[in-house]
Image: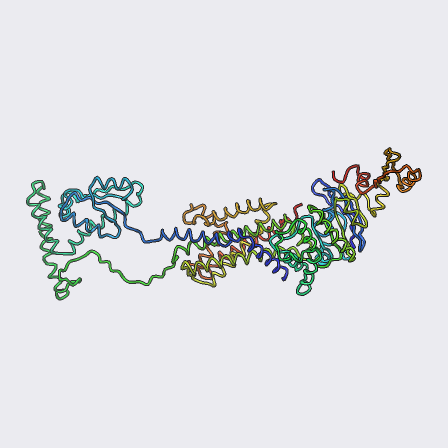
Amino acid sequence: MLKLDGLCKRFGRITAVDNLSLTIHRGEVFGLLGPNGAGKSTTVNMAVGLLAPDAGTVDVNGCGSPTQTDVRAHIGVAPQALSIYDELTGEENVTFFGRMQGLRGSKLAERVRWCLDFVSLADRRRDRASMYSGGMKRRLNLAVAVVHDPPLLLLDEPTVGVDPQSRNAVFDNIEALRADGRTIVYTTHYMEEAQRLCDRVGIIDQGRLMALDTVDNLITQHGGKSVVIADVAGEEVRVETQDPLAELAKFQNRGQLNRFKVEQPDLENVFLELTGRSLRD
Amino acid sequence: MNQIIALALKDLKLLLRDKAGFFFTFFFPLVYAVFFGSIFASQSKPIEGIRVAVVDEDQTPNSVAFIEELAAAPELDVLTTTRAAAGDLVRTGKRSAFIVLTQSFGEARDRMFWGDPATLELGVDPSRAAEAGMLEGVLMRYAMEGFQDAFANPDVMRDKAKTVLKDVADSDSINPIARAAMNRFFGELDRFMGEVPKFDDQNSAGQSENGDGSGGWQPVVIQSVAVAREYTGPKSAYEISFPQSMTWGVLGCTAAFGISLVIERTHGTLVRLRTAPIQRWKILGGKALACFVTTLATLTMLIVVGILLFGIRPSSYALLAMAFASVAAGFVGIMMFISVLGRTEQSASGIGWGVLTMMAMLGGGMVPLLFMPGWMKVASHASPVKWAIVAMEGAVWRNYTTTQMLLPCGILLAFGVVFFVFSTRVFRWTDH
């Protein structure tokens, strides 16, 4: 669905993206994970045709570069910045951007209705966006991205600055879109989001792709061992192991296990292993 | 085309919902027009008489008659008073000047061609120096009218000649040669004036030209002839102030839409527009169309108010439409120029208004070009504001022909094209 091949982008002396190649398959949710400034947004901007790469190519759905106008019709984008008009109502925002996508008449009306229902803003559709909470604006930002029913969605940090309840609502929306068979590219620096939503994750740092695989494989390959912390005969025991269940079975067989806790490796550990620093640095 | 119209409608909707922006775009220029129109209107009223204090130290029939003539003069507003009071009135600025008819004024006025002349003292407020020359001219005119009357009336002239002959005979100070010359001249003048009615009787069967039978000759007679004059100036002061204020409305639209393009970029909506299947020129075209329509709406609203409430009567509505379209098109280009001046909306707003204010200052949008020094009038050709005012004045009160309108309208269109092409080439589509 989306193929990036040897992408490079420099801003002055800074290399934002350095020879980045990856292929995203139809129907998958692909996470682009990295700290702020890693090059995620630059990669997304090149993927949607906003930035021209200094080197490399982008192909969308086998149709060619998104710099071509008709190719961009295959893409829906929810930029990191809330790209909506505060003085227009929710309905007017979705309708306007639907028109920009070439929708007209009953098709447009139907898509606007669906989008507002999808993000649970139908009852607030006549309120100006300036009256919305941060979470509602994020959902409207998502609604505008899907108004033309695109097969490929690029969501750039779609949960930045929202409360946990709204974040869960956004997660529900994304899972519904995945269930509907859309391809989603999801950039974030929250590892929990990537672990929950993404089929595969690419870890990017300083413009380079450090690793690319499923979450489980990345953790297995780069996350290190699990840690079992147990109260054994009144004494706390800490054991690093590849097989926590086997360790717990040993303690149980001795009849000395009172309490236990298992700390499993996550993408934070993967990132630390790959880059030597934390995702939130 | 549908996308361009949708973009323009969106911008118009945003403008209408921005109350402050709406006020400054539509109503501020109206306030400006009414304010300056009122000022110009008060300046264009008929000139009032020069306020003078008159002192009669002679107190003779001649001096009293002269003061009555001055009081009746439309050029003067006369207050008769004492010398001390007159000085105070001028010093305190309540009167522009004082005039003193000195002693012997009346006696001197009866003399002709000899002796000391009738003397008027004139004291003028130093801050009214410009009025001093006019006042001297007015006094000389009324003083000469008595002399002219004597030549026009043979009986009066004969009385004066006889008085002079008697004075000359009574005087011991006149030398014999002058005495002989004056006796000869005034004797002949007396006889000549006695013959004038007879010439007139022979020429016009007893009726003089003025029909009073007194004959008389005048060096020149000025007759007023009714002429249906073609008036080409403004019919009211508002016809001057409205074109000026309308340019401020145009500048308001220009700034608002120029900055809105920067806001689109900084708020991210431009990114979303660019990821839509729409060409860049359509995005800018939509903004340009919205600016063009809003500018036309502002100009139309202002001229309608001017017509309905302030008596403005454009000389040609067709040429006015041509001027409006040219102004709107020209300033669409400048709107694009504003959008490339700053990276943020704050900087674009500050720099944009700075540039527009300079254009207004240079182009006569603030101070009329009439009051500018010569080099600045030449420099004003570089300001689109000047050509906007010229185009609108041409259609409102200068009675321009279509050919004459081509120059300002063509220059405005050229400004628009040059600025638009340049600005679209350097426009920053992203914040990177």
**B223 or B284, nearer to the observer:** B284
Extreme residue in the bottom direction: B205
**B322 or B307, nearer to the observer:** B307
Q: Is residue B281 visible?
A: no
Q: How is the image coloured?
A: rainbow
Horizontal placement of A249 versus B171: left or right?
right
**A262 or B145, nearer to the observer:** A262
Extreme residue in the left direction: B170
Extreme residue in the right direction: A253
Horizontal placement of A281 versus B309: left or right?
right
**B301 or A267, nearer to the observer:** A267
Coordinates of residue B395 in the picture (x, y in percent): 45, 59
Horizontal placement of B99 versus B158: left or right?
right
Horizontal placement of A3 versus B296: left or right?
right
Coordinates of residue A20 in the picture (x, y in percent): 78, 46
Q: How many marks?
A: 0
Extreme residue in the top direction: A235
The quadrant the N terminus of chain B occupies is bottom right
The quadrant the C terminus of chain B occupies is top right
Q: Is residue B182 visible?
A: yes
Coordinates of residue B67 in the picture (x, y in percent): 19, 49
Coordinates of residue B212 in the picture (x, y in percent): 14, 62
